[in-house]
Amino acid sequence: MRERNKNRWWYAVLAAGLTIGLAGCGEHQEKEEEKAEIKDSVTVVMGPSSEPEAGFDPAYGWGAGEHVHEPLIQSTLTVTNQDLTIGYDLATGMEVSEDGMTWTVDIRKDVRFTDGEPLTAEDVAFTYNTLRDTSSVNDFTMLEEAVAVDGDTVEFHMTKPYSIWPYTMAVVGILPEHAYGPDYGSNPIGSGRYMLKQWDKGQQVILEANPDYYGEAPKMKQVTVLFMEEDAAFAAAKSGQVDLVYTAAAYADQQIKGYELLAFETVDNRGFNLPVIPAGTEDKNGVPLGNDFTSDVRVRRAINVGIDREEMIGNVLNGYGSPAYSVCDKMPWYYEGSEIEYDPELAAELLDEAGWKLGSDGMRQKNGIQAGFTLMYAAGDSVRQALAQDTANQLKELGIQVTVEGVGWDTAYDRAQSDPMMWGWGAHTPMELYNIYHTAPGGEYATYSPYSNETVDRYMDEALACNDLEESYELWKKAQWDGTTGITQEGDIPWIWLVNIDHLYFSRDGLQVAEQKLHPHGHGWSIVNNVDQWSWEF
């Protein structure tokens, strides 16, 4: 194992393009060459899970799914701006029909793929129709067909109105119809800022700036991405072999000579569901539903205000995080009234009101039943485990007994229908809100926890049907709270949101990482969304 790591370090040195200085008069010259080279190249370390198993093919998840980012190799029609509103990449304009069933997008005429062929509306239509038929990551059920009207205009005919279509367009890289085949993921041709120069599976990816890119030329001419486990990544930084290294809060108090710790805000949140119906029923597959303790809204409200999120951030995340009150904190569709103050006195009052009285042992009971529940977390995830344990410790102070249990994902989804589960979410689209809270199509409750509210569903349906994206934001906010009902503290509160986890990196001195947008769930490719704008200062 030690020998393999040693080989990886040496491989990383070669990949980064670092040189070994020679003694004597040649040393100064080689250092100057190294300095000149490093000014337009960077080596970034990500975790092994960031390596795309199916390669760099948008049809198989590249740029989408859990680790949403803007594909570097392919161009997209739209992009998300710094404030997560929509901007243009390939698109020069777009409009949606009055009924929301047709999107018309005009595209640039000056774009070529890296093999020299022009990118046209036919390629755009081909891409979306291909993803509609093959993608197992993104949902394309709302797309009936993409049609090239002419060389630079494409129409998207929808199966239903879908106001947030521009957010889908921001993560779908455009494929070349003439050069697409089974091995595309390993040998991608695109029109984006970078070209894939080399991919050594399980080790590294080397990207090279596209000399014919239609936008501003990348400052970083070469980007090397190494895939390493946390401890190996930390060791690589300590030995000075890499430039930017992902790390976890457990390493945040460590000092590495020649590096600084960078922390980026995220909507990479952690929280747990609280089943809102009593136990005693099953779904059509025989999965038990409901929880007698959490089914009382006063209990759910007590838990929400009875958790000190700031203390949790300090205890579990070493201070590197922010309180979470929603699955969409800080985004354009976030309802700011979701925020609450830590109030253990109010929590105690609510529990008393619900009939859960403190006993001599400091724990609460009602009709001889102890107040509490099992809180599951994904086995092997140390952060979720620590958050679950901290939750248990804090709720014990309120007299609620929480049993923490690590489980596998093979059973977690079913068990979460009756026992709360520590989840991780966060994406640059309001569909995250929809997927968590909206009643599942053809079902009685939402997908991940038994909850349903017709008014909440209606607002989200109206938001999707709206033909004005800006107006739809207000409907998403109303789904969270409209003054009478919703999913916030004053409403049903079917989920408890705890923290947004900062994404941490050790960065070599002199590396200027461009300003980052809120990172989504997943500590991976989102960091290099704007790597073309990074620079070195000495």
Image (spheres, helix red, strand yellow):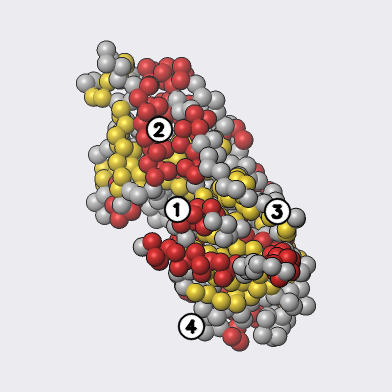
Q: Pointer 1: residues within 10 angstroms few (<14), some, or many (20+)?
A: few
Q: Can residue 366 be seen in this view?
A: yes
Residue depicted at x 24% and y 51%: 286
Is tag 1's residue or tag 3's residue first in the polypeptide sequence? Answer: 1
Judge depth for marks 2 and 4 and give the one in front: 2
Residue depicted at x 57% and y 50%: 505
**Which label is found at residue 510?**
3
Residue depicted at x 58% and y 57%: 240
Amino acid type shown at disc 3: Gly
Find out whether the residues at labels 2 and 4 contact each other: C-beta distance under 8 Å: no
Amino acid type shown at disc 2: Asp
Residue assigned mark 2: 390
On the image, the x and y values in percent for residue 315 come to: 46, 32
Amino acid type shown at disc 1: Asp
On the image, the x and y values in percent for residue 223 come to: 63, 67
Is tag 2's residue or tag 4's residue first in the polypeptide sequence? Answer: 4
Residue assigned mark 4: 182
